[in-house]
Image (tube, rainbow, N blue to C red):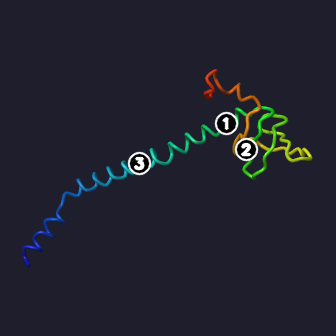
Amino acid sequence: MQAIFRTLDAAAQVDPAGSSIMMIGMIVVMVALMYFFVFRPQKKQERETNEMRNSIEIGDVVSTVGGIIGVVVRIKDEMLLIESGADRTRIQIQKWAVRGIEERAHPEAHEDKDGKKLKK
């Protein structure tokens, strides 16, 4: 029984400076993991989305975050005028509301001679 108490006393007298360094090291490792698994991929996705929105041209078929699909008729700064539906209803939206480009007006302008997509 006394051997157990001696072992517990020895464990309690561990160097407190060593344990604080270990704790700081664990925090640094956790921050690094969060950066590589959360923040870095999120920034990459934002950059790709911004490139897609900046490459919109007149005649492209786009879909909005609200689910509206239409053809781009006019581009002015951060605003787009899209034409949607059989009755050709025109709706003015902001660029940030574009979720994706469904069809390019001039796909050859965004591909090289081998049919591969060009990066801007």
Crowd around label 1: few <14 · some 14–19 · many ≥20 (10 Å) = some
In primary-sequence order, the first of circles 1 and 3 is 3
The mark that comes first in sequence, 3 or 2, is 3
Cα distance, mark 1 to mark 3? 28 Å
Residue beneath the point at 18% across and 60% down: 14
Residue type of the residue flagged with mark 2: Val
Residue 29 pos. (x, y %): 36, 48
| Quadrant location of the C terminus in the rendered image | top right
The span from disc 3 to disc 2 (Cα, nearest Å) is 31 Å
Q: Three-letter amino acid code at disc 3?
A: Leu
Residue 82 coordinates in the image, percent (x, y): 83, 41
Identify the residue under disc 1. Answer: 52
Looking at the image, residue 23 sits to the left or right of residue 59; the answer is left
Q: Which residue is mark 2?
A: 98
Drawn side of residue 26 relative to residue 81, left or right: left
Q: Residues within 10 Å of mark 3 (few under 14, many from 20)?
A: few
Q: Earlier in the sequence, mark 1 or mark 2?
A: 1
Distance (Cα) linking label 1 and label 2: 9 Å
Of helix, strand and loop, which one carries label 3? Answer: helix
Mark 1 and 2 residues: CB-CB less than 8 Å, in contact? yes
Res. 33 mark: 3
Q: Is residue 67 left or right of residue 88?
A: left
